Image (cartoon, rainbow, N blue to C red):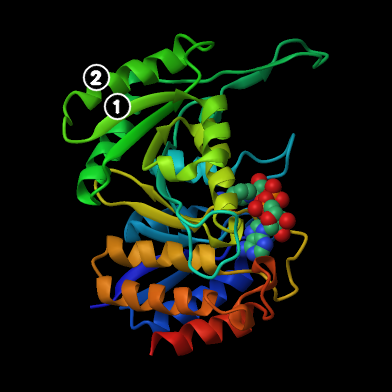
Amino acid sequence: MKRLVSLIEGDGIGPEIAAATVKAVEAAGAQVEWERVDAGMGAVERHKDPLPQATIDSLKKTQLALKGPLATPSGGGYRSVNVTLRQQFDMYANVRPVRTIPGVPCRYTNVDLVIVRENTEDLYAGVEHYVDPRRTAAESIAIITKFGSERCIVYAFEYARKHGRKKITLVHKANILKMSNGLFLDTGREVAKRYPDIEFDDMIVDATAMKLVIAPERFDMIVTMNLFGDILSDLTAGLVGGLGVAPAANIADGGCAMFEAVHGTANDIAGRGIANPTGLMLSAAMMLDHIDQRDAAERLRKGIFAALANAETRTGDLGGKTNTAGYTDAVIRSMR
Ligand SMILES: NC(=O)c1ccc[n+]([C@@H]2O[C@H](COP(=O)([O-])OP(=O)(O)OC[C@H]3O[C@@H](n4cnc5c(N)ncnc54)[C@H](O)[C@@H]3O)[C@@H](O)[C@H]2O)c1
């Protein structure tokens, strides 16, 4: 039986990479059926709502989404739909694997790490206000709870066991943010005692940024809070070729999950047919693993890695010579 998936194409390059991904997923033989729903600035234009009720209802029903990037204007305007979706469905663990891909030009040859980012708390909890009526000062409050920290850190340890990972580094700034980040760190130390088979250490975020650039191969898994996870996962994407190739999964307890590329709407290249759909395609492969369609996931990855290995069939952001459509055709040809 086909599994129903809520498909949110998203803004900017979203519709282009979503079309490419749907084509590749279907060619891989995945047993999925798409329920197309709206979110983001496109949804504002069409429904006057960045997150229409129909989209929420679809995700409640399917418990599974593949999502393109959504625009979030800086400063005023709508609250991030990405953050709202993650919080509303309590998708507290954001999993971002980063791996060197043979043939893709980058500075390193042996990066293979996974970032697990807490997805619902921290400075993204949405608690902020102006201090005075003239708006000359503002406060954003980082919420860190033991409950939120523990379930995310436990998820990271369970992930490590399931995927044969050996070491977790908890990243924080507890030397300065002694209470909020201290709570995350203390919780991590407590949880680590329950997993003696997994090595555990911690690192301050600024030093982590430096060490990731100097010796990324020393990292196996990172678990961290929302803001640091957001920043470090773009940094690590840059270690393996850029945002175009970085996938992600948002996971809740009880099965609800949403898969999306790490990158944003890439407005500078939207509508030109040159975007790299790899991040969303690899996210779709993670989705197929999640719903136990492993053969289709493997076929999809085989096609992606073969197409990426050749400059003739890579997109321009990776120094290649083709566009979104040419790359997608190459992915599909390479699956056979
Ligand atoms: N999950 C999400 O939906 C998500 C994530 C990040 C940013 N955003 C939103 O996206 C918008 C733009 O953000 P930004 O410009 O900071 O980041 P961005 O990721 O959209 O773009 C950064 C740079 O990377 C390039 N790039 C990104 N994805 C690419 C791809 N698939 N192929 C080729 N090049 C690619 C872009 O052209 C740009 O030069 C903002 O509104 C932001 O809030 C959404």
In terms of depth relative to the viewer, which is nearer, 191 or 121?
191
Left or right, 94 with reference to 267: left
In terms of depth relative to the viewer, which is nearer, 239 or 27?
239
Q: Position of residue 226 (x, y in %)?
A: 49, 33
Residue of label 1: 150
Q: Position of residue 56 (x, y in %)?
A: 45, 52
Under mark 2, the amino acid is Glu
Q: Residue at the location (51% across, 19% down)?
A: 173
Q: Residue at the location (22% across, 41% down)?
A: 158
Badge 2 vs badge 1, beta-carbon distance below 8 Å: yes
Q: Secondary structure at mark 1?
A: helix
Separation (CA) of disc 2 from disc 1: 9 Å
Q: Earlier in the sequence, mark 2 or mark 1?
A: 1
Residue of label 2: 190
Ligand 1 lies in which image quarter?
bottom right
Q: Classify 17 as above or below 70.
A: below
Q: Secondary structure at mark 2?
A: helix
Q: How many marks?
A: 2
Q: Position of residue 279 (x, y in %)?
A: 52, 62
Q: Classify 269 as above or below 28.
A: above
The label nearer to you, 2 versus 1, is 2
Q: Residue at the location (53% across, 85% down)?
A: 330
